[in-house]
Amino acid sequence: MISDAIINSVKNISSLDVLKIREDFPILKQLIHGKPLVYLDNAATTQKPKFVIDKEREYYEVQNSNIHRGVHLLSQKATMEYEKAREKVMRFINAKYLSEVIFTKGTTDGINLIASSFGEKFINADDEIIISHLEHHSNIVPWQLLCQRKNAKLKVIPINDNGEIIFEEFEKLISEKTKFISIVHASNSLGTINPIKDIINKAHQYNIPVLIDAAQSVQHYKIDVKELDCDFLVFSGHKLYAPTGIGILYGKEKLLEELPPYQGGGDMISSVTFEKTTYNELPYKFEAGTPNISGGICLGAAIDYINSIGIKSIEEYEKELSDYAELRLKEIEKLTPIGTAKNKGAVFSFILDGVHPHDIGTILDFEGIAIRTGHHCTQPIMDRFKIPATARASLAFYNTKDEIDFLASSIKKVFEVFA
Ligand code: PMP
């Protein structure tokens, strides 16, 4: 049993003014089943600050127009705002050029784009693509589809019982047949943070390009694509306090130049005749059709909001909150954590003796607590741990230690209901 003195000493330190920050998120003031909402499903999607919501309203009230093609003032204004957002993303991830920042629908879209385009040009029969056992389905299925099309092979880096990739096994998988590596930075179901810098360094010794799935990391840690030296990186706006339907694919300019377009249509062309089409320059070559204009602008606004707090401060506070959650969950008998990596983010997957995860989720919902239950789109991880599902609490910087206390006491209540 952990003493109250230890819990209080941890609880009383706070590096962020969270109560003030919570005022920025209108949804958090809601009651759910008559109880204050405790939103702990941030790995699925994050809530939106009023600053972002207002930006969307403002866009539709005073700027709405199609971009890039209009000579009228509204179109020029919308184009300018959209391109300004691209610049904000470029600075946020420290990309070298604007041409390296491609707007997508989200992480899934970005991975499909690369699997399709890179796969089309560079993957041939008997080639191998490496992923890990920690991947979300969206970083498995596009590669399987590619392998089926090209008669190539998918190789999977195994994980240990803590949910960490086994680096020596990764090294053993690399051969002259390896043509691409696609790997998650932080696991959405176990919280494991992969040693992506080491993976990239190793891959580059063999000239193998690497894609990083940053869906669960870009909102928590400073990402510097130049320092990482990753070839591609993808993420979703909706997990970064922006709306759904917008995301980013970063790619090194030299590589993107070499890739064929993913989709054809307006905006991605430079000239079209029935005989021949020439393509637009980067990044537009990969942005066919009218994009999610307000989504892009709001992603820029979300980045402004995050910058106003500081990603380093967010990281620091979330670490503090995670340490506290770990301490509180450890106290609960008959709770088994799934995913106990040494390097782990603010995601807590667990099972309770004798209670199905869906029942945990339902009982907690009646307390106003939103967690996620199921396989979290990572069925191979569930298979690895021989379980059908977990309950998962995932944190963001607007969560408080009081909410963690309430989660812990409500989990204890779950046992009472089942007693
Ligand atoms: N990868 C990871 C690690 C994720 O957590 C998610 C979303 N849960 C995705 C990919 C897919 O993201 P999206 O559904 O926004 O495309």
Image: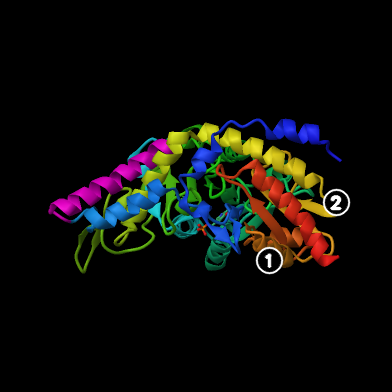
Q: Identify the image quadrant of the N terminus.
A: top right
Relative horizontal placement of residue 385, taking residue 249 as reference (left or right): right
Asked if marks 2 and 1 touch (Cβ < 8 Å), the reply is: no
Answer whether residue 334 is visible to the viewer in this image: yes
Q: Is residue 235 above or below residue 414?
A: above
Relative horizontal placement of residue 270, taking residue 20 as reference (left or right): left
Q: Is residue 76 above or below residue 196?
A: below
Answer whether residue 191 is visible to the viewer in this image: no
Q: Is residue 20 above or below residue 184?
A: above
N-terminal-most mark, 2 or 1: 2
Q: Which mark is residue 333?
A: 2
Quarter of the image holding residue 208?
top right
Magenta range? 70-93
| Residue type pointed to by label 1 | Thr
- Residue located beneath label 1 in the image: 362
Give the CA separation, mark 2 to mark 1.
20 Å
Q: Secondary structure at mark 2?
A: loop
